[in-house]
Amino acid sequence: MAANPSDLLARAIDADRQWDRLMRMGAIGMVEQTGVDRACLTADDRTARRLLIGWAEAAGAGVSVDAAGNLWLRREGMQPDAAPVLTGSHMDTQPRGGRFDGIWGVIAGLEVLSALHALDLRTARPIEVVAWTNEEGGRFAPGCMGSMAWSGHTPLERFAGVRDEAGISFGEALAEQLALESDLPRRALGGRPHGYVEAHIEQGPLLEAAAQQVGVVTGIQGSRWFTVTLQGASAHAGTAPLSLRRDAVQDMLRAIAALNQLTHDPDDVLRFTVGRITVSPNTSNSVAERVTFSIDLRHPDASVLRARGDAIAETVRAAVTTTAATVTEVFHAMPIRFDEAVIDAVEQAAAAEGVSHRRMPSGAFHDAQFVAGICPSGMLFVPCRDGISHNVAEYASPGHLAAGTRVLARTLLALAAG
Ligand code: GLV
Ligand code: MN
Ligand code: MN
């Protein structure tokens, strides 16, 4: 019996080519042999994008960029005017990130385009692969700027003034990148795809522990980010009596202790992280004049996320004793449930591929959280070793990644059929 197109496509997924591309991407911004530091809108980011563009063009894809710097690779369908099926993820990394978070979703999408090209297989709908700008939020906070701007969740202009540690604004860095990529056709910001499926490493331990190959993602928990600034006064460490100080570091400790109480969850579902602290003037023998720290708060239940998040500003103000506290919310992504038809499509693709799979929610946020407001969306996960991510030790095996890409290929083919 002749193989059906889904089996043909799955067989044409080239595990070695995909791994080789991932390793070549991982060499751009490499840290400590296995890690990557490739912030968005940097020279390394542009080098990675050019490499991707070369591979995409060789696979017959059209390349374009939008006003948010999102990079688009398109394989035309038999119905060129039909709404495309979209896949992709991001190419930026955490400052000490891994070789798989984000980039695999882009390379997996490209692998599907490459396999379709090699087979000369044409889907009814176009298929597009997108690399979203600044998903990580490491250089410019918050993350997901590209998908938030594309989906209309937040106007692009709202991000222009966000500055990195060197004082460069997102607007300036984006303008520079768009100028350096002015040879690429520009496309409109926004759209209404037929559906979106994002492939990603799990970034947690569940699939590996259960010895399962694919996670069929049912939704994403909510996240809120805050920036807290405590303004005190600098003073001489040797002479200023403690009773007269307005020490921003001491108040930060009080604030974080109070926040730990506010966010305490005996069930260990709520996530509370202070991951970035900036102290000024940051010397050993001066009392800290100003501290800025980040808060990352996450929970799958919108009411819990709302209640605890809304109490943060008051908790900080009540805890500090000598400094003036300012609390600003910089990111707000409510929990979402993915579209049932897309969840089913991923599940059926995993079954057709014959890989073990389970339904699961995502603890990490992803661009899919914002795309889901525009079109039916879903995700699939593959295991990563020891659940480690946002770490140079992050690792996913070539075999798991190839199986995930075969499931992605089957899912995209099904969605692009009609
Ligand atoms: C994404 O990188 C996240 O922090 O969940
Ligand atoms: Mn990611
Ligand atoms: Mn990440």
Image (cartoon, rainbow, N blue to C red):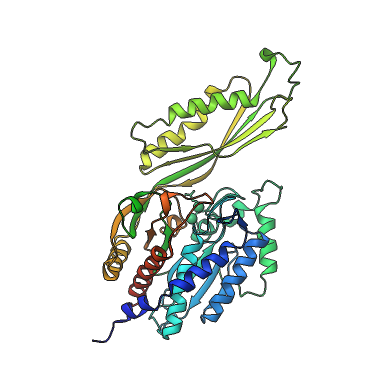
* Location of residue 407 by image quarter: bottom left
Q: Residue at x 60, y 66 (%)?
A: 48
Res. 284 visible in picture: yes
Q: Is residue 72 above or below residue 97?
A: below
Say left or right for 314 vs 372: right
> Observer-nearest residue: 20 or 232?
20
Say left or right for 374 vs 225: left
Numbered disc total: 0
Q: Is residue 260 above or below residue 65?
A: above
Which percent across, then down, holds residue 33? 58, 56
Q: Residue at x 66, y 66 (%)?
A: 178
Which percent across, then down, holds residue 149? 54, 58
Which percent across, then down, holds residue 151? 49, 60
* Location of residue 231 by image quarter: top right
Say left or right for 43 vs 66: right
> Observer-nearest residue: 340 or 33?
33
Q: Is residue 170 above or below residue 404?
A: above
Say left or right for 189 vs 170: left
Which percent across, then down, holds residue 52? 57, 71
> Observer-nearest residue: 195 or 402?
402
Image quarter hosting the C terminus: bottom left
Res. 128 visible in picture: no
Image quarter hosting the N terminus: bottom left
